[in-house]
């Protein structure tokens, strides 16, 4: 009898067989995961106009789609799909993409779009593209709804860079919805002009708008300038019912002798000077103990004492006085004309620019409105003031006098805590005292004071004291003054208050360890004029190290290293003796050049004067900051001023003075562009375009040139060589480094609105 086979076990056997087959696998080849990789990889970079081939392999032999980012500006492929291992041709875009030309190339599997190969390529212009502004440079400031004409030029080795032209943009932040302004043409040819119009409204304090002129071919190659847009009109750069102190010193055209002036005036904010007074001195005349010269008011910005400015912060200031000794040679008795370059609303640089005299100086907003003998003591029992005056004696010797004097609320100049140094034609008296018979008086409520300084130092160098200074108070710690006595000579200078720091400068660490400085000296040497600019670092004990200097002594420029030492007056006056050797005014590397500086404890650079027989020079000790330095350390809009001494063939010395103020844009890429107001003796030349160039050094000593057609008339060349000593991004000292002239000057960063 045949038995039936059980059904369930057979089903189980089949099921188990299926499970076993699944667990043990099939005898067929397993599938390979899909992968894409470049078989011909893209290059790391590619210049515009240059194609290249690229290929990708897919693990299963399928095709790829080609694409790139940023979409729309990354280039193209032909064909856009290829088989595994088959090449396509990539063509870069017509212009360099944003973000420094970064492009990502991708080969994406047609079968599985999650599988791809990618590589980064930098698209370059294939050469250099330089963009520079054309004159006039973009102004540092504009009023709302005001226009300025702008132009830029491209120079390039790249095909189409010049022909593609310039793209203009204006960017800003916190515009309060009013926008950043507009251009009449956002695209211009190289050298073409567009008109920028500022926004109709701005937030309080103004709006900084960055103007960018970029190569259309490669927008990463550009030049920028910042325009501060405010509600201030140019006529209000000198504000309504504001008073300004000023001082200027230089050389009279007709006599070649020194002159000085200082004063104060009040403005109406609309082009007129409404009141003021001035002291004047030269070898023939001084206001002395008499009343100051009266400044006559202006009338509707047309006649009398008036002023007018342009958006770059430059302008002309006409001062009409009742002094018949001023302005005779230009046919306008009692009239002076000054070129002004604003640095801020509180400070401006000045040049006398008329046929009577050429000179340089500064102007500052007066912030004190009521004056008494306690104004300078500033609530203290004794307030120290550092000071330096420079000029010439009545015996026609170069002369400098400096030190520290203390004043109290009773109008006394105290001998206690004082010190004085004199250099008269190379005859030196050091660390003398000021006697207690000195005094100061307040002459009127315009801030005019008279300071009398008595010292045995005068007699020790063959001079007769006292020195009488008529000054004008800017604030409780700043006084501009000129000498008005008939005892010593014709000189001018500045006093800076030490305030709470009076008498506290006792430690060598007043020049801290590893602190960097730029030191300057400018004045007379036996055979003409000399200028010095140098860097050095203090060790906080007594040494000055790592110095690098430029010297121009009577048209002989030299550059080299310096070392030195310093010593601090233990009495706490702030007097610091400085001795440097190497490339100095002395001319002998083994002989020390000796100076003294007077510390004030504030932000003003300490005043300095030379104390040896090699020269009679004055200058400053600037604290240097911001290093290591690069091209971008010198960038922005600057007011500038410099004094030059050119060669006099008859005298065979560098004694012909000319003075210049102006405004310039440093683009941070080594280029300068601006406008100068120049006074060659008897031949003023305002509104002169200049260009310049500079190369950077990490030490802050840059080298370069200034070029202007105006230089041709006096020097026979349009280009002068300079070194630029970067004090900070806000200040740059310049010194001429050729045989055309002996020059020292300063660029100061403009901070509008003015």
Image (spheres, grey):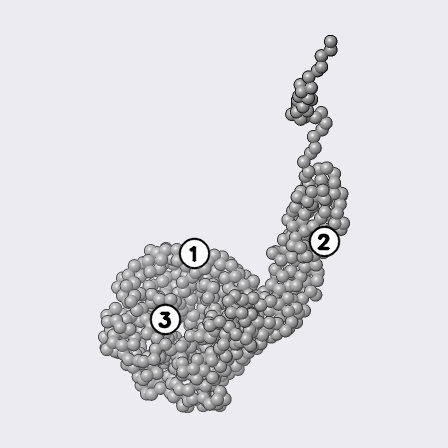
Label 2 SS: strand
- Going by the picture, which residue comes out furthest to the top? 1
Q: Distance between the residues labelled 3 and 1?
A: 28 Å
Q: Where is residue 12 in the image (x, y as percent from the top left)?
A: 66, 21
Q: Please report whichever mark, 3 or 1, sits nearer to the chain's N-terminal start.
A: 3
Residue 426: which numbered mark, if any?
Answer: 3
Residue 356 is left or right of residue 385, and the answer is right
Is residue 105 among what the camera can see? yes
Instruction: Say which quarter of the image contains residue 592.
Output: bottom left
Q: Do the residues labelled 3 and 1 touch (CB within 8 Å)?
A: no
Label 1 SS: strand
Q: Position of residue 142 (x, y in %)?
A: 53, 75
Whether 462 is drawn above or below 45: the answer is: below
Q: What residue is disc 2 on? A: 76
Q: Distance between the residues labelled 2 and 3?
A: 77 Å
Labels 2, 3: front one: 2
Instruction: Say which quarter of the image contains residue 614.
Output: bottom left
Is residue 458 among what the camera can see? no
Residue at 30% from the left image edge and 65% from the top image edge: 501
Residue 159 is left or right of residue 481, and the answer is right
Q: What residue is disc 1 on? A: 546
Q: Distance between the residues labelled 2 and 1?
A: 56 Å
Instruction: Say which quarter of the image contains residue 475.
Output: bottom left
Labels 2, 1: front one: 2
Q: Where is residue 68 in the image (x, y as percent from the top left)?
A: 67, 51
Q: How crowded is mark 3: few (under 14 residues within 10 Å), some or many (20 or more)?
A: many
Label 3 SS: loop
Location of the N terminus (image quadrant): top right
Q: Please report whichever mark, 2 or 1, sits nearer to the chain's N-terminal start.
A: 2
Labels 3, 1: front one: 1
């Amino acid at each position: 009898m045949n038995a039936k086979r059980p059904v369930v076990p057979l089903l189980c056997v089949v099921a188990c067989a299926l499970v076993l087959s699944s667990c043990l696998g099939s005898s067929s080849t397993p599938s390979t995961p899909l992968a894409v990789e470049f078989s011909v990889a893209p290059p790391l970079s590619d210049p515009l106009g240059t194609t290249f081939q690229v290929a990708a392999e897919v693990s299963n032999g399928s095709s790829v789609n080609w694409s790139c980012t940023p979409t729309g500006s990354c280039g193209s492929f032909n064909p856009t799909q290829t088989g595994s291992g088959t090449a396509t041709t990539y063509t870069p875009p017509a212009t360099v993409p944003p973000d420094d030309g970064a492009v990502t190339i991708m080969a994406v599997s047609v079968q599985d779009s999650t599988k791809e190969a990618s590589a980064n390529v930098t698209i370059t212009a294939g050469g250099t593209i330089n963009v520079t502004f054309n004159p006039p440079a973009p102004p540092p400031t504009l009023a709302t709804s005001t226009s300025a004409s702008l132009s830029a030029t491209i120079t390039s080795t790249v095909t189409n860079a010049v022909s593609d032209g310039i793209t203009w943009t204006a960017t800003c932040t916190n515009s309060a919805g009013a926008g950043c302004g507009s251009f009449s043409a956002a695209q211009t040819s190289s050298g073409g002009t567009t008109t920028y119009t500022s926004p109709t409204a701005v937030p309080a304090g103004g709006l900084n708008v960055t103007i960018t002129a970029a190569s259309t071919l490669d927008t990463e190659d550009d030049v920028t300038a910042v325009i501060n847009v405010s509600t201030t009109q140019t006529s209000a750069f000198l504000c309504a019912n504001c008073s300004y102190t000023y001082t200027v010193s230089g050389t009279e055209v007709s006599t070649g002798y020194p002159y000085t002036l200082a004063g104060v005036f009040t403005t109406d904010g609309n082009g007129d000077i409404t009141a003021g007074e001035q002291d004047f001195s030269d070898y023939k005349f001084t206001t002395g103990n008499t009343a100051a010269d009266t400044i006559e008011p202006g009338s509707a910005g047309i006649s009398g004492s008036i002023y007018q400015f342009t958006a770059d912060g430059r302008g002309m200031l006409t001062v009409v006085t009742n002094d018949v000794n001023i302005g005779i040679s230009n046919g306008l008795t009692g009239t002076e004309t000054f070129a002004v370059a604003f640095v801020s609303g509180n400070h401006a640089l000045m040049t006398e620019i008329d046929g009577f005299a050429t000179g340089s100086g500064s102007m500052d907003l007066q912030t004190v409105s009521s004056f008494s003998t306690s104004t300078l003591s500033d609530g203290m029992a004794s307030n120290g003031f550092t000071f330096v005056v420079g000029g010439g004696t009545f015996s026609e010797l170069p002369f400098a006098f400096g030190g520290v004097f203390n004043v109290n609320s009773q109008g006394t100049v105290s001998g206690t805590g004082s010190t004085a140094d004199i250099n008269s034609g190379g005859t030196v008296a050091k660390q003398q005292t000021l006697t207690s018979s000195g005094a100061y008086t307040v002459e009127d409520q315009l801030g005019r004071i008279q300071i009398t300084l008595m010292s045995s130092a005068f007699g020790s160098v063959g001079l007769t004291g006292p020195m009488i200074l008529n000054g004008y108070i800017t604030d409780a710690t700043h006084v501009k003054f000129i000498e008005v006595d008939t005892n010593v000579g014709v000189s001018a200078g500045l006093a800076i208050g030490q305030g709470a720091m009076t008498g506290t400068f006792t430690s060598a660490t007043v020049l801290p360890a590893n602190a960097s400085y730029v030191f300057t000296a400018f004045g007379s040497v036996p055979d003409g004029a000399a200028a010095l600019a140098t860097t050095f670092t203090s060790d906080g004990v007594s040494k000055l190290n790592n110095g690098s200097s430029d010297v121009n002594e009577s048209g002989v420029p030299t550059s080299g290293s310096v070392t030195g030492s310093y010593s601090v007056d233990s009495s706490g006056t702030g007097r610091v003796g400085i001795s440097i050797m190497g490339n100095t005014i002395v001319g002998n590397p083994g002989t020390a050049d000796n100076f003294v500086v007077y510390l004030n404890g504030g932000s003003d650079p300490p005043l300095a004067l030379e104390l040896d027989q090699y020269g009679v020079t004055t200058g400053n000790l600037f604290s240097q900051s911001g290093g290591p330095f690069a091209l971008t350390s010198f960038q922005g809009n600057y007011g500038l001023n410099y004094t030059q001494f050119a060669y006099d063939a008859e005298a065979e010395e560098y004694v012909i003075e000319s003075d210049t103020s102006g405004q310039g844009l440093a683009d941070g890429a080594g280029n300068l562009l601006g406008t100068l107001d120049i006074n060659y003796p008897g031949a003023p030349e305002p509104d002169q375009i200049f260009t310049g160039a500079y190369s950077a050094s990490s030490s802050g000593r840059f080298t370069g040139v200034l070029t202007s057609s105006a230089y041709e008339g006096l020097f026979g060349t349009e280009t002068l060589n300079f070194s630029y000593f970067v004090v900070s991004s806000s200040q740059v000292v310049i010194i001429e480094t050729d045989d055309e002239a002996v020059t020292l000057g300063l660029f100061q960063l403009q901070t509008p609105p003015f």
